[in-house]
Amino acid sequence: MTVKTFEIRCPVYGFISLDPWEREIIEQPAFQRLRRIRQLGWTDAVYPGAMHTRFEHSLGVMHMASLLYNGVQERCGDILKTEYQYDEAGISRYRRLVRLAALLHDVGHGPFSHAVEELAPYNGDGEGRRRRYRHEEYSTAIIRKHFRDVIENHPANANYRFTVDDVCGLIEGKAAAGSAAIWQELISSQLDADRMDYLLRDSFHSGVEYGRYDWRRLVNSVELVPDSESDSWRLGVSDGGRHVAEGLIIARYMMFSQVYFHKARVILDYHLHHAVEALLPQGVFPAPVGDELDEYIAWDDWRVLGLFSEGQGGEHARRLKDRNFFRLVYETPEIPSVEDEAQLEAAFLCLDGLNPVRREARKSWYKIGSDDLPVAASNAGGRTMLLSECSSIVRQMAPSRSVRLYVSKEDRSVAKQRVAALPKERTPS
Amino acid sequence: MNTQEPRADLRLATISALVKHAAPHSLGRTAVMKLVYFLQVLHKVPLGYDFRIYTYGPYDSQVLEDLKVAELKGAVKSSTVGYAVGTGYSITPGSEADAVVARSPSISEFMPKISSVINEFGNRSATDLEMASTLVFVDRTEMSSGRTITIADAVRKVKEMKPRLEPIRISQEATSLKGKGHIAAA
């Protein structure tokens, strides 16, 4: 019997195909909520086209994960069969699992995506960590509560017998994934489907070319490569794919430097954080536990914008509405020297009384630079190389540690005069 | 740990101290990753990393970021070396190691634990470290989910992730870890 497929238009890939099971998952209210979560927060104040949502990104990640999976399976089927004991049913089963994990990995995003995720409450796990809940933890809590029935009890699951823990295991990076662990890197790694999709999609909607790379070539280059230090297989690229892998890294760097770390976007995130904080009880989102989870799900962009529209959210919401955001008056180079850091402190002190806001751009593209991608040997019997070894460009990419100082628009002139009076100053144009 | 101390300082100091304690042996990237994992999970050093499991064991790319920062600060040196199937890194102490370690007020509290981890695991191969850390990860994941597993279950799960390892070898490692109290599997 032929299974009916549904096709959804996608501005990046043309069409994304779904089967009836996936369509039912997408129709769940907890997934439809992603239509009301913008992918890039308040970025449209800088790039007006950036109004896309987590909904289309999630579809795109599923599509890209499928392409990568198929590519690995085509090129490395022998490894999967002989070492991981996959048969045809196993290949079909894990393809399905990867698609589900990719589709659902972002259902836990809060309003405006990453812009306000620092408003999640703290969590501790007894292993030296005290940190805020991550959106992945909201995702897996939501999957376990709201997608359990549509995953575990769907007739199509009779072929697979998946539990929600199987899906969550891939998203959480937990050992519950068992033999699916080989696919963990498609969901979270330097070459994951999430990254490959968001660069293309964010670039498209922002109207910039920076995030584009030859994704078709990359899909056709991904394969399992022996790890150089141990008896493991890793997701890597063929020797012929190393330059397109470089292209992905450069695209990520460019998107961070030109879009995600844009001077106005960075301070808009600051205003959005404080405006949403003013809306929340105790200034934090509900935790992804118990009844609080559904309270969390009730938060989306529509609700926040509605409250802003009613005059809530305080000064920061007004500044967002009026596009009266704080202005940049000082910034360090991307890679500040000790002297630059000293100059930054001098600039901060000279702004005393103007309530300067310090914003750091440290979450950077560099994780790729330091997290070497294995590149298969070009000759039979040859050795695995690391991308940083093959690529002088990647090798030279140092982490961005840029710091910027902002003041209110009203104080900008005074602030600039003070900064200009500093010796060896470095002022923005 | 001094609650006012930036976590980044403790991480850099810990990595630098690990590499220094291991000398004259150099460490590979895998070794640094797994030794840091053991420090956080087995010895409760509050490093704040968020490890996920891959076919090559517990991993957090932030460890490699911190390793790179340690290198930029001169606390460690890194060079490429050839292995049987590919190229890896050899990480040795840098001239600024002592200065970077000294920058962390609380590192002295954890020095005995760093010594303990190096003594126990510092000479193990990357494959052994991956196997041991994967066993610990599997065990901790099951425990945190309120489940108990047997040694045989843990061995089977590790074998699924690392098919090239012989079950007897995984089983011996699991028994050893159990004997030292590192895993709870029955």
Image (cartoon, helix red, strand yellow):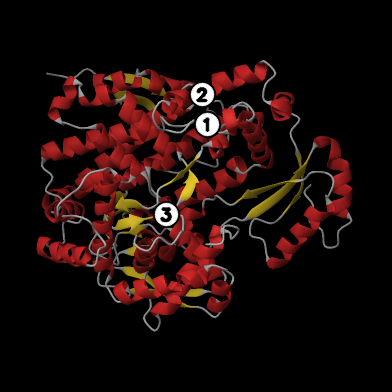
| Residue type of the residue flagged with mark 1 | Phe
Q: Position of residue A39 (x, y in %)?
A: 51, 31
The chain to which mark 2 is attached is A
Mark 3 — residue?
Answer: A243
Q: Amino acid at mark 2?
A: Trp
Which badge, 3 or 1, is on the more N-terminal residue?
3
Of helix, strand and loop, which one carries label 3? helix
Would you say B12 lies left or right of A90 here? right
The answer to whether B82 is drawn above or below residue A273 in the figure is: below
Vertical position of residue A261 compared to residue A321: above or below: below
Image side of residue A32 versus residue A271, left or right = left
Q: Is residue A48 visible?
A: yes
User: Label 2 vs label 3: CA separation?
Assistant: 42 Å
Q: Secondary structure at mark 2?
A: loop
Spatial CA distance of label 2 from label 1 is: 9 Å
Q: Are marks 2 and 3 on the same chain?
A: yes
Numbered label attached to residue A68 = none
B135 with respect to A198 (left or right): left
Secondary structure of residue under mark 1: loop
**Quarter of the image where one finds residue A14:** top left
Q: CA distance from mark 3 to mark 1?
A: 42 Å
* Residue sitting nearer the eye, A261 or A248: A261
Mark 1 and mark 2 in contact (Cβ < 8 Å)? yes
- Where is mark 1, residue-wise? A285
Query: x%, y% of residue A138?
Result: 41, 34
